[in-house]
Image (spheres, rainbow, N blue to C red):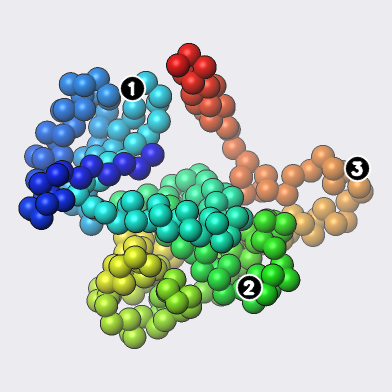
Amino acid sequence: MDLVVCAQSWLNGAHSNFFGIRALRAFGKFLSQKKITHYNSMEFIASAKVPLVKYIDSITGLRVDISFDRLDGPQAVKTFAEWKEQFPAMPILVTMIKHFLAMRGLNEPVNGGIGSFTVTCMVVSMLQLMPQVQSRNLIPEHHLGEMLMEFFDLYGNRFDYVNTAIRMKPPGYMHKARVREVVYKNTDRISVIDPNNPANDISGGSSNAGRILEEFSIAHSMLKQRINELTQQSSRVKRSASILETIYAGNYSSFRLQRAHLRKLYDAR
């Protein structure tokens, strides 16, 4: 869960007070005193582009990231809602890809991965630039498997992330050398121009871009191989087989326990 805390003084034009490790730790102590979380289990990231306080909620057990005095998060939520209306398949694909990245430790920008909004933009960009989707000859929500394969193939095998930036408004690609608003210090990272702020590259922290896109390529190959194998099997085997297990297999007991706990809290409210 991502939260944003904005001080009234900052909204009125003053400088942010949430700057530096001391301010983040002071906020962490406040949360601990309110028994929202335990101080010793908190993580304070002051040196990142977006400083964060990370913790686990004491009641729900949910992981929470709090940023401070920024409006890009709420703006991104509004943009997400607009894209969801336009592309109903988008939230499903984003969830699948986010989980794929989380299983491989590549979903945290502070660790060189890519975050939720970057994944959302990559999915939307793909849908925006597919002629068959724009012509409505293909309805993405009716072809989710094909869309997932297209995503892995596009970004894993065909997308030139070293030289190319993804632009959302208007939809398209730009050579990084021609992006005037953003100064690229590292071209070996995924670049997505913020649809709400052209001067902001929302994927600037993706130092593991090479590995991320390699994992997409591997996923595409594994799924393609699995599909080919199943086409040669009997219909009985096909019914009991899973295509996605090749890239999503794992122990999901913690998910089931988390959901059961949240259900219990909800029922007891």
Tell me if label 2 and label 3 are in contact, CB under 8 Å: no
Estimate the spatial distance between the alpha carbons at disc 1 and disc 3, rounded to whole Å.
Answer: 47 Å
Viewer-proximal residue, 102 or 199?
A: 199
Note whether 266 is above or below 145 in the view shown: above
User: Circles 1 and 3: CB distance less than 8 Å?
Assistant: no
Query: Looking at the image, which residue sits at the far front?
Result: 12
In percent of the image, x 62 and y 49: which residue is there?
247
Q: Earlier in the sequence, mark 1 or mark 3?
A: 1
The relative height of residue 207 versus residue 193 in the rendered view (above or below) is: above
Residue marked by disc 1: 58
In the depicted structure, whether residue 6 falls above or below residue 123: above
As shown in the figure, which amino acid type bears the numbered disc 2?
A: Gln
**Residue 212, percent across and down?**
47, 60
User: Could you say which is closer to the camera, residue 147 or residue 139?
Assistant: 139
**Up/down of 210 relative to 250, above or below:** below
Three-letter residue code for mark 3: Arg
User: What is the C-alpha distance between the residues marked 1 and 2?
Assistant: 45 Å
- Image x and y of residue 183, in percent: 25, 76
Give the mark nearer the N terminus: 1 vs 2. Answer: 1
Q: Which residue is mark 3?
A: 236
Dot 2 crowding, Cα within 10 Å, few <14, some 14–19, many 20+: few
Residue at 45%, 77% (x, y): give it. 170
Query: Which of the 4 image quadrants contains residue 113?
Result: bottom left
Q: What residue is pinned by disc 2?
A: 134
- Classify the position of the N terminus by image quarter: top left
Labels in figure, total: 3
Q: Residue furthest top?
A: 268
Q: Residue at x 37, y 21 (%)?
A: 59
Q: What is the quadrant of the C terminus in the image?
A: top left
Residue type highlighted by circle 1:
Ser
